[in-house]
Amino acid sequence: MPLLLAQPGELNKIMAVRGGGETKRFLESMGFVEGAEITVVSEFDGNLIVNVKDARVALSKVMAGKIMI
């Protein structure tokens, strides 16, 4: 399921990162790699703030839709 459907505070594992070459490389450079643990901190209008690899990152709903948990 896409990261967009995760509940805040719930620990999840990234199963896949989808998207074109540049998009996928961009997400992976920020720590969104298969097997990484990720937690949604908050959600506003589909946009997310998440914890991944000891960093807090803001994601648009488009980018969050490319991350499968």
Image (cartoon, rainbow, N blue to C red):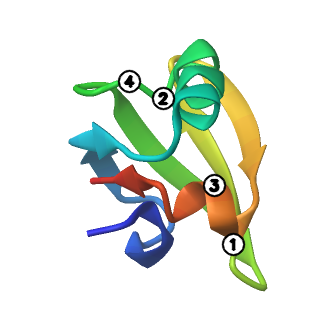
Secondary element at tag 1: strand
The answer to whether one can see residue 50 in this image is: yes
Q: Nearer the viewer, mark 1 or mark 4?
A: 4
Amino acid at dot 1: Glu
Q: CA distance from mark 3 to mark 2?
A: 11 Å
Q: CA distance from mark 1 to mark 3?
A: 13 Å
Q: Residue at 22% of width from left, 26% of height from top?
A: 35
Is the Cβ of the residue at disc 1 closer than 8 Å to that at disc 2? no
Is the Cβ of the residue at disc 1 closer than 8 Å to that at disc 4? no
**Which label was assigned to residue 32?**
2
* Residue 2 location, quadrant: bottom left
Looking at marks 3 and 2 on the same chain, the residue that comes earlier in the sequence is marked by 2
Is the Cβ of the residue at disc 2 closer than 8 Å to that at disc 4? yes
Query: x%, y% of residue 14?
Result: 29, 40
Q: CA distance from mark 3 to mark 4?
A: 13 Å
Query: x%, y% of residue 15?
Result: 21, 42
Amino acid at dot 2: Phe
Q: Is residue 26 above or below residue 64?
A: above
Looking at marks 1 and 3 on the same chain, the residue that comes earlier in the sequence is marked by 1
Q: Nearer the viewer, mark 1 or mark 2?
A: 2
Secondary element at tag 3: helix
**Which label was assigned to residue 43?**
1
- For disc 4, the marked residue is 33
Viewer-closest of 31 and 22: 22
Count neighbours of disc 3 (C-alpha within 10 A) and say few if under 14, some if 14 to 19, many if 20 or more.
some
Looking at marks 1 and 2 on the same chain, the residue that comes earlier in the sequence is marked by 2
- For disc 3, the marked residue is 63
- Horizontally, is 14 left or right of 17 in the view? left
Q: Nearer the viewer, mark 3 or mark 2?
A: 3
Query: x%, y% of residue 39?
Result: 46, 47
Viewer-closest of 12 and 47: 47
Query: x%, y% of residue 66?
Result: 47, 55
